Amino acid sequence: MTRRPRVLMARLLSLFRTRGLDRSLDEELQSHLDLAMDEHIAHGRSPDEARAAALRSFGSVALVKERYRERRGVPVLDALWQDVRYACRGFRRTPGFTAVALVTLTLAAGSTLSVFSLLNALVFRTLPVRDPHSLVQLLTVSATNPERTYGLTLGAFLELSRTQSVFSTVIGSSGGHIVTVDVDGTRTSGAVWGLTGNGPSALGLQPTLGRLLTDQDESLTSFTAEPVVVLGHRFWQRHFDSRADVVGRSVDVEGVRFTIVGVAPPRFAAFGLTMEPDLTMPLLAEVLWIEGLSVSELLSRPARWVQTTGRLKPGVSLDTARAHLETLWPHLRAVTLPPTLTVATRDEFLSARLVVESAAYGYEPTLRARFVRPLWILLGIASVLVLVACLNLASLSLARAAARRHELGVRTALGAGRGRLIQQGLTEGLLLASVGTSAGVAFGYWASRQLSDEILRDYIVPSSVNVSPDGRIILVACAVAMLAGTAMGLMPMSQTVRGGAPTLLRQNPRVLGGIGRMGPWLVGTQVALSLALLLNAGLLVRTVGEIAAVDAGYQRHGVFVAYPTQKPQAYKSVDNDRYYPALVERLGALPSVEAVGISQLKPAGGGGGWKEQVAVVGGAPDAAGVTAEFTPLSPGFFATLGIPVTQGRDFTWADRSTARPVAMLSRSLAHQLFPDVPAIGQRVRIGTAAHRQDLEIVGVVADARLYQLKSGDTRAIYVPSLQEGEIASFKALVLRAEHLSLADVRAAVESLGHEYVTKLETLSYVEERARLRERLTASMASLLGGLTLLLATVGLYGLLSYSVRQRHKEIAIRLALGARPGRIVRAVVGAGLVVTLAGAAVGLGVGLLASRLVRSFLFGVSPYDVRTLTGAVLLLVTVALVACLLPATRAARVQPTTALRLD
Amino acid sequence: MPPDKPDVLHGTLTLMVLRTLDTLGPLHGYGIARRIEQISGDQLSLNQGTLYPSLLRLEQMGWVKAAWGLSENNRRARYYTITRAGRTQLETERDQWARASDIVARFVDPPGDPA
């Protein structure tokens, strides 16, 4: 029927004007009756007879109105709207229940969503580029140090682009250098990123302003003539006030003038998840202008610095591409061998393996390795919290429905079917659940921002993870809302309306209505789950304590750390043999500084160290050697950190690049390599680098865990920084002082003109940040566990209160007959304890099963740790006891006379 | 005792209302009900109220339109007028009714059979 849409439209529109339409209908029907009456009166009847006759021939007015209304509106929506209004009235009448339900849901849903948002950002979200699943990243891994990944050399990248046949585009990028930027005379720092010209179009990026890089910007002639740069969105907002006239203006980057051609799209974090590049320039420009290399140096540079990403041609799978590239790789490697490599490093270069992986989810290995596992654990815990919250709300709703029994009985007697009542209950539950969960979404977003800020706090450039709600998060929120809504609406209503009107209308029900049978089970389950959570939270807390208690072998108090950043152009003229001692001297001259040292690796940061194979010179030439932590450092480092030199001497400035190569061993390494002879004077070789093949041991130090507190391996070898050939750009300054200001350190470092300092931290702070992962997990787990315990306890309290209230009369009679109040108290508390202990027993089992799952996360404490177990159980029983005592004492204070008088 | 008045066949109410409005012009609900009663010679027992849901349906279908007006004795009443679409529908329903009664007639009084 072609009239259908018209009718539907009319019916939908009428929903908005119900009151007006009702009035109009009333008027019309009244006018009908009036006209009928007129006619009857005209035929000679009396007004009363006329009215009676009119009504008789009309039929039932109420029935007509109902039929009319049914046809007028959309009955399903009408019923729904009616239910919603009824539910809201009900909520206003029981504000306590409504408030508790909303708060519980907000906290439970919010916690789950906040954890899930972070997981979503790290695990499920793809890069915000065109067709992320066809992007592939290429990494190289050296045979000796498989945890470290690198890119390709420039030569390899160019050759690959030329000879491969599986990618439609090959994009090269490199980034993360912090540079000084001059914006209209204001100096600031920013992260610079180099990108090949084909990048922005291949990724489908749209500029916010102006344009993005193109292939033309890449040509050598182009960027020597006019170097161009694209601003990052956040950088543009912060330093240019989001002005639209930035295009065409210039900025000085490390003293080189660049022209701004556009602004990048917002929230674009290159191929990673966190850091938004502040400046993007052509790939080669970045190296030539910023790092100051010449073109030929650039082409023969052995460093594998080009991050390579390819877009698969349509129809080509990742596996096909991988196979193709792996066959191409050995030849590629050999043909692009940098000429400046020594024999030893050449072998290492030629043994590097190519890794081909999907780049759809971005490149963020450190963050993921650290936080994905704990987040899954926390998600599990939060889900249990949601479950307990739903159980709790179900029992609250049961009690509420039981109180409305009379009203439901009246409605049933008036003709409401059971289905209709259940529909109404479900609407009520879903309505409340939706409101609570929506608040949870907002709360979850806020909480996830806090968490992400905390995790990324120490990144040099402000970074953030994208935790904004997307489809997946809404889906999870809806699932929670459905679960909670059904628990609050369906279950109680279906329990209560059983039995029909007669049962419902009974004045003094002997049984506890709907709550009686289900109550203890609901509470018992909550108790069990909360104990399981408490147990695991306790284990996580113990882990943090155990890590903190590890004897690291150095003195952390009173030590400061700074990480100077080089001024790239100035770096080339540095003579480290002179620079390092000068730096240490300037810093040592500061008033409160007692000792200064330099290390090429970040101490106490929890990051991996640098492992190398150490073997004795003169032993079997192809012996594998012992794996040990390798750290180049300066004289004074050990003194600053309070690591005693047990044999021989510390390094001195005489151990410079031209002097005889020396090394120091940790006690355990010395013991392993030279069990029978003193290590001093012996010779060792480290790895395959040419300059480390014959080192004389000059000292042995006490064992220290400079990097991984959790590892039991304390074998370490140290070499002087000055003898470490090409010193990498990273440097950590350690200073022992009572107090120290950043300004002083800055002044001392910058006075030498090669580097600058932006941050000063204490070693304790660095260690604390290293433990962030464990600390965060433990505190969130405790928070969630505490919440769950609170809910379970409130549930227990509610259950007992309710039962006491129901059995008011029985208690009164007992007291009147001479029972002692103490007996009543004991009975109530006993009932509560039965539920608690039963729940605790189950909870213990569940908790121990769960702790096996988190075992890999624990440190220094077994999953079956007795202390934690007993602690958790004691906490639970104590809190439960308090929850039982309150209603129990209330029961004992029942006045028999007043209770029996009220009927 | 007069025989029980048969109930109005469901679908024919539309036909009767449209025909009434077509013949008599704009009319209020009471007027339509009285007219139907008269034409059927008081053979139909029509609860006048049941007219209104049908009138609503006709309005929703766009076959009639309604407006408030004044009756002869100055009473406010809602007057219904047939629309052009309504006239078309009237024709359609007349044909359908004619055909339907024709088919039924062939069963009840088949041609060629002695009555």
Image (cartoon, coloured by chain):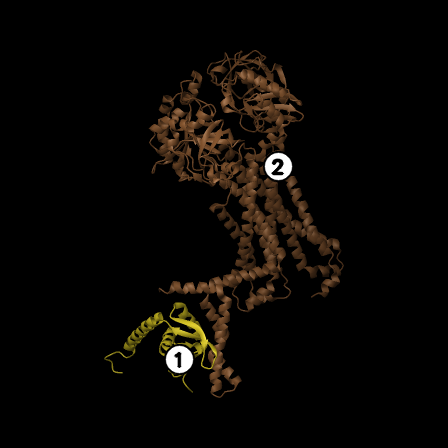
Q: Which residue is label 2 attached to? A: A541
Quarter of the figure with residue A348: top left
Looking at this view, is A431 or A866 the one in front? A431
Nearer mark to the viewer, of 1 and 2: 1
Measuring 61% from the left and 47% from the top, which residue is drawn there?
Answer: A527
Quarter of the figure with residue B95: bottom left
**Quarter of the figure with the N terminus of chain A:** bottom left
Looking at this view, is A707 or A525 the one in front? A707
Outermost residue on the bottom side: it is A44
Q: Position of residue A859 (x, y in %)?
A: 59, 32
Q: Position of residue A658 (x, y in %)?
A: 52, 12
In terms of secondary structure, where does tag 1 sit?
helix
Q: Chain of mark 1?
A: B
Vertical order, A598 against A816 (above or below): above
Q: Position of residue A603 (x, y in %)?
A: 58, 25
Distance (Cα) linking label 1 and label 2: 87 Å
Quarter of the figure with residue A774: top right
**Quarter of the figure with the C terminus of chain A:** bottom right
Q: CB under 8 Å between callouts 1 and 2? A: no
Q: Amino acid at mark 2?
A: Val
User: Drawn colour of chain A?
Assistant: brown
User: Drawn colour of chain B?
Assistant: yellow
| Camera sees residue B64 | yes
Q: Which residue is label 1 attached to? A: B36
Vertical order, A610 against A885 (above or below): above
